[in-house]
Amino acid sequence: MRKRRALLFALQISCVTPYGWLLMRPGARWGMVLFFLIVGLTTGSLTLAVSNAVDMIDHDELQTGERREGAYFGLWSLGLKSMNALGVLIGGVLLGWIGYHPDVAQQPATIFWLQMIIAPLPATINLIGYLIFRRYPFEPADMERIQAELTARRQRAEAAGAGGES
């Protein structure tokens, strides 16, 4: 399976898997094992986004003539760290709003809202990611063309540099 299709498939599955939390009941060990296997495989597949980022960097180099992977991965890292911090902040605020209190039996309304936080909310965020990456146009033929053009450009630059030396 091509990496773009694999990434889109993983994102589609990740739009559904959070709802598994709504199906889990206390003591359903095998159900939890199956659920965590599916979630783990899906989450692992999302690392394909990094591989697709490398393709975007090559495309950017073809368009601009500059190799800017440091800038891309710096922004990527900043985005990941910012979203992790924002997620912790939002999670803490939401837990307070729904009346969650640690180490005590939760009220039915609190349990309902906990389920809403861990199922539809992540599924919706994954759907946004899917809609964004769906527009990502690079199929293997596109990447072969980009790589060929970059190789030709680099060879021309090396030949021009070697020809100018005496």
Image (tube, rainbow, N blue to C red):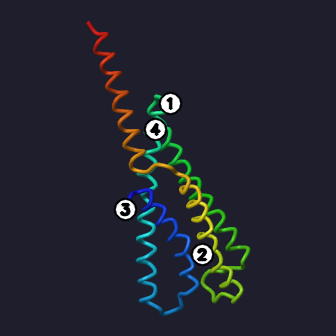
- The answer for how far apart the CA atoms under marks 3 and 2 are is 30 Å
Residue at numbered disc 2: 118
- What number is the disc on residue 1? 3
- The answer for how far apart the CA atoms under marks 4 and 2 are is 34 Å
Q: Amino acid at mark 1?
A: Thr
Q: Amino acid at mark 4?
A: Gly
In this view of the protein, which residue sits in the foreground, 79 or 43? 43
In this view of the protein, which residue sits in the foreground, 143 or 32? 143
Residue at numbered disc 1: 64
In this view of the protein, which residue sits in the foreground, 141 or 69? 141
Instruction: Answer left or right for 97 relative to 51.
Output: right
Residue at numbered disc 4: 70
Instruction: Answer left or right for 121 relative to 62.
Output: right
Query: For the point 52% across and 76% down, which residue is it?
Result: 17
Q: Residues within 10 Å of mark 2 (few under 14, many from 20)?
A: some
1 or 4: tag closer to the N-terminus: 1
Query: For the point 46% across and 28% down, which residue is it?
Result: 65
